[in-house]
Image (cartoon, helix red, strand yellow):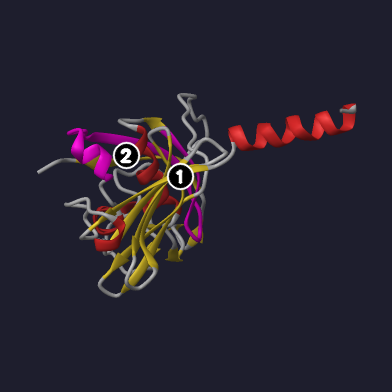
Amino acid sequence: MNKTTLTILVLALTTICCGQTSQTKYFTSEWLAKEVPENKAKFSQTITQNTDGTTTTGIKNLTKNEIVRSQTFKGNEPYGIWKFHEDKGFKTIDYNFPLIYSDEKCNDILPIATNDYFENNDSLGYRAPKISTGELTIYEYLGKNIFYPAVAIENGIQGTVYLQLTMTATGTENIVVKRGVDISLDKEAVRVLRELKFSSPPTVNGQAYAFKCLVIPVKYKLM
């Protein structure tokens, strides 16, 4: 066997050993209450170990031949694009971004100091930005859009995630976790703030400003 052939075989074996693997189980319902043989199943659950170190779990409706839920983790970190079924159709959640932690002090000077940058302050000539999806407060927006991660609920994890960000004329950017609780809660909080958009900018005396170094608490509490 020549050297070229041997190299090809080694590469092929490496690909097989380190490639993507999956395991499928079968159930009578979407919520995986009872495992059954494939010929009696209505839904399947496939757990795939991806080559990038992530794990994807997909729930498939075998009758309709469609994925009804799909989620990916890298360790305990939500990762990639998630998909699940709602009454009005399918919804996707985008976790395809890096999670950044930082304890560095932000030294930028804000143009004004107020207790809530999402509330008007007439004495300072401040007009808060309007949230494009219609919520009147940041807390209403968070309450409407945060999905409490199932893994955190199952483990009884709660607390307050503190995020630092820049509030621009159109939304938010440069989001970092100043103080986290759990990686699943931290990433969900960042995801929702990343998607925050404004229909009008924050202004001081009629002039639009970008407000850096804002810290926003996102509270998770189990009932």
Which percent across, then down, holds residue 16?
Answer: 62, 37
Query: How would you rate the neighbour count of disc 1 (Cα within 10 Å): few for under 14, some for 14-19, many for 20 or more?
Result: few
Question: Which label's residue is closer to the chain start, 2 or 1?
Answer: 1
Q: Nearer the viewer, mark 2 or mark 1?
A: 1
Point 46% across, 30% down: residue:
101
Q: Is residue 3 left or right of residue 193?
A: right
Residue 55: which disc?
none
Q: CA distance from mark 2 to mark 1?
A: 27 Å
Q: Is residue 150 magenta?
A: yes
Q: Amino acid at mark 1?
A: Ser
- For the C terminus, give its image quadrant: top left
Image height of 126 relative to 214, above or below: below
The residue singled out by tag 1 in the image is 22
> Where's residue 199, x and y in %?
44, 68
Q: Which residues are magenta?
A: 149-177
Res. 122 visible in picture: no
Front one among 78 and 54: 54
Secondary structure found at label 2: helix
**Residue 189 percent across, percent down from the top left:** 35, 45
- Please name the residue shown 31% across and 53% down the image: 123
Does residue 115 appear anywhere in the picture? yes
Q: Which residue is mark 2?
A: 185
Q: Quadrant of residue 203?
A: bottom left
Amino acid type of the residue tagged 2 in the rendering: Leu
Which residue lies most toward the front here? 1
SS state under label 1: strand
Q: Is residue 44 magenta?
A: no
Residue 222 pos. (x, y %):
14, 41
Give the position of the N terminus as an image quadrant.
top right
In the figure, 44 relative to 184: above or below? Answer: below
